[in-house]
Amino acid sequence: MNRVCMYVPSANGGHARYARELMTALAQAGQRGYAFELVSSEDLEQQFRDVPYDTHPILPKLRARSEFSSGACWAFNRVTHYARREWRLLQWLESRPDITAVHFQEWTPWLAAPLFRRIRAMGKKVFYTVHNVVPHRYPARVPKRLMHRWIRQACRLTDGLFVHTDVLAGELKRFLGPDKLPPINVVPHGVWTVPDAQNLPPIQQRLNDKKLLFFGTIRRNKGLDLLLRAAEKLPGYSITVAGYPLERAYYHNEILPLVDKARAAGVKVELTGEFLPDEKVGPLFRSHSAIVMPYTQGFAAQSGVVFMALAYELPVIASEVGGLRDLFSEFKIGTTFAQYTPDALATAVQALHAGASASELLKHMRAAKGRFSWDVAAVATIAGYEAATANAKTTQAHDCRVATTSAC
């Protein structure tokens, strides 16, 4: 029996949700001699514990600033937190010789390479899902060149890498360079499972409301500034921005002034600068006409936001970048724009609302939901594990041939 530990320190949020969806599909499918267990933080939310696989909430939680008597104590705890977290994982793995592989959904870049070496020294395989080649944020004092070096070292030490799109696979190969690499496997993201996706308002009714939604973390490569610059070109439309600002300078220096400008021009803009609890996400997606994803060329991944839109059968307006391009080339779930300008975005919005066939949109969205299922992701994940095993056998056979030739 191959027993895989899925390592997801996040107690909530996108990574925790992703792991639950994928592992539930893996567990329910009874995949060919594989069993799965989750290792996560001790404050893991209950919704991620009520699952059809074993969970181990054993990692130290990241404590809030308010829990410490001084800033110095908080800073020390924050600096040492990640090393303590990784050490706890190693202790647990030492006690579990039956674990044959560890699949990381998250990592600490500066600790990943030595951690992977320790795990492989135990005789266990190491896998990593590359959600983004380089983290969106990391300590400003860390030079970019050093961060890239840490990531390359760690990736090359894995037995297999997973990405969500062919575009991201290509970017990862270019980033890692010409050296021999572990197998890179494309595992498409699945459409989120949501409890309230029944009896949705008709698409045509929602289109008539002309309510645009921007959802997710606010950072420059998500392109919220472009949507707000296009606002004046969209009379009769309202805009809802529901997301937490990860890049504070961008948010305060560009987004807030653009919101004020749009409102001064008579555009209704609702802004929620915070994370939304799960119970508020459904009503938001059910009550809007379309979701707008004006992502920049710096966005190569496949956004989880589009799979929330598909779960609620909400049309999508998106720029033609990264994994979004692949998705839209196969399924007409909304409209796209190639030129990254306010005029092009406004034209795409108007084209969707004026010319879209509700029945065609619905047909393509439901076809996409079938194509991007978690069952498909589970099968592709197992195939990635099997590819690593085959790659290891090939390498061993080659080493044996080389050793035999040298001996002769």
Image (cartoon, helix red, strand yellow):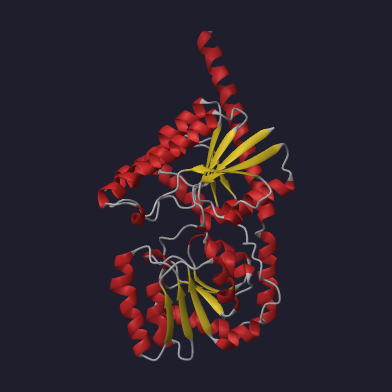
Asked if residue 12 shows in the view, the reply is yes
| Residue in front for this viewpoint, 37 or 289 | 37
Question: Where is residue 380 drawn, in percent x and y?
Answer: 65, 47
x 61%, y 51%: residue? 49
| Residue in front for this viewpoint, 158 or 247 | 247
Residue furthest out toward the front = 69
In this view, 323 is above or below 348: above
| Residue in front for this viewpoint, 47 or 288 | 47
x 33%, y 83%: residue? 260
In the rendered image, the quadrant that contains the N terminus is top right
Question: Where is residue 293 drawn, in percent x and y?
Answer: 48, 70
In this view, 283 is above or below 150: below
Question: Where is residue 235 drawn, in percent x and y?
Answer: 45, 91
The answer to which quarter of the image holds residue 127 is top right
Question: In the rendered picture of this protein, how many numbered marks are placed on residues?
Answer: 0
In this view, 186 is above or below 211: above
| Residue in front for this viewpoint, 353 or 6 | 6
In this view, 394 is above or below 22: above
The answer to which quarter of the image holds residue 256 is bottom left
Question: Where is residue 58 drawn, in percent x and y?
Answer: 52, 42
Q: Is residue 185 left or right of residue 245?
A: right
Asked if residue 354 shows in the view, the reply is no
x 53%, y 28%: residue? 94
The answer to which quarter of the image holds residue 97 is top right
x 29%, y 52%: residue? 69
